[in-house]
Image: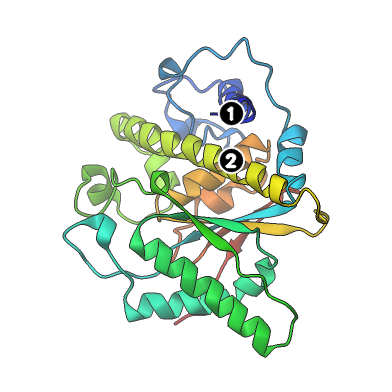
Amino acid sequence: PSPAVAKLSSAFIGIMRSLHCERGQPLHLLPSSQHPLLPLPIDTVADTSSHVPLAPSEIQKTFLESGITRIAFIRHGNTSPASNDFERTLTELGRSQSRAAGASYGIDLYPFSNVELCSSAPRCVETANLFLGSAAETMQQDDVGDYAMPKLSLQEQMYDGTMQPEGSRLFAKIGYAPIRSYLENENLDDVEAARIVLGNYARSSLDIMVGATTKERRHNASTDTDIGRTLLFLAHAVYLPSAALCLAAALDCYNGMDLILDTNTKEAEGYCIDIDKEKSLLCRPKI
């Protein structure tokens, strides 16, 4: 990763270390305000003591200089079964959910960044296109003004098939549930497995988000960056909150963590993290 991303990852690991979470310690014994979230296993990461941690204010600056003030983490819509999990596609219900999301909270998230981040899985790509198209159509009908349709940046790393319905013992045991169910578990082996898988996904997601803001900053070098834009992150149920928690931790924003930890992310819904440290749920109308 770039030096900026390396610093950001180092800062995240430093924050996790500062919580004094010893490997194997039951997570429920820690105060909610000092929840370890998704630390990478400490004994598997390189020594970062030689790095100066990046202050949360500097992390904010990384996003704000690119004109991004919000990051929206959105789950794909309802899907049909498939022999290969990656190939699952949206049902008609899933398409309706995606359109409803774009026509509702999608309007509140506008304007969007020039490029949005999306898992390369077909169900996420279709959700993103329907979401953005519905938002554009609604704004045009309401005569809100010019609508700039962003491009999708498809990211293979944003799909991880380790925990999915047909191929994961841990997922089969817990299923679609709030991420706290994976991180606070009586079986410490299960907790460690979740921390490794979701922790690695979280760090990779942070890398992707920072890379996107760097490109956005270059694109907006000669334009007004005072207009707050939303960076979309469209991905998968259990993994989505891990990415959101990682960004919140990097921003040193622990207030409101329970909102992400305790929410079972519904289809075509998710979370929004404001760089000013506010968190909110993204809820569409019921279908």
Which of 257 and 76 lies nearest the eye of the viewer?
76
Residue 208 pos. (x, y %): 53, 42
The reply to whether dot 2 and dot 1 touch (C-beta < 8 Å) is: yes
The total of numbered circles placed on residues is 2
Q: Amino acid at mark 2?
A: Gly
Write down the quadrant of residue 200 in the picture: top left
Disc 2 to disc 1, how far (Cα)?
Answer: 8 Å
Residue 2, label in figure:
1
Q: Residues within 10 Å of mark 2 (few under 14, many from 20)?
A: some
In which quadrant is the C terminus drawn? bottom left
User: In the visual, does 45 lie left or right of 84?
Assistant: right
Sequence-wise, the earlier of marks 2 and 1 is: 1
Q: What residue is at 38 percent from the left and 31 percent from the top? A: 196
Residue 42 % position (x, y) = 46, 19
- The residue under label 1 is which amino acid type? Ser
Residue 198: x percent and y percent? 41, 39
- On screen, residue 210 versus residue 76, left or right, reads right
Q: Residues within 10 Å of mark 1 (few under 14, many from 20)?
A: few
The answer to whether any part of residue 31 appears in the image is yes
Report the residue marked by disc 2: 211
The furthest residue to the left = 83
Say which mark, if any, is on residue 111: none
Residue 205, image x, y percentages: 50, 42
Q: Is residue 187 above or below residue 221?
A: above
Q: How is the image coloured?
A: rainbow
Residue 268 can be seen in this image? no
> Residue 169 is drawn in which quadrant?
top left
- Nearest to the observer: residue 8 or residue 34: 8
For the point 77% across and 48% down, the residue is 221
For label 1, the SS is loop
Considering only vertical position in the picture, is 202 above or below 266? above
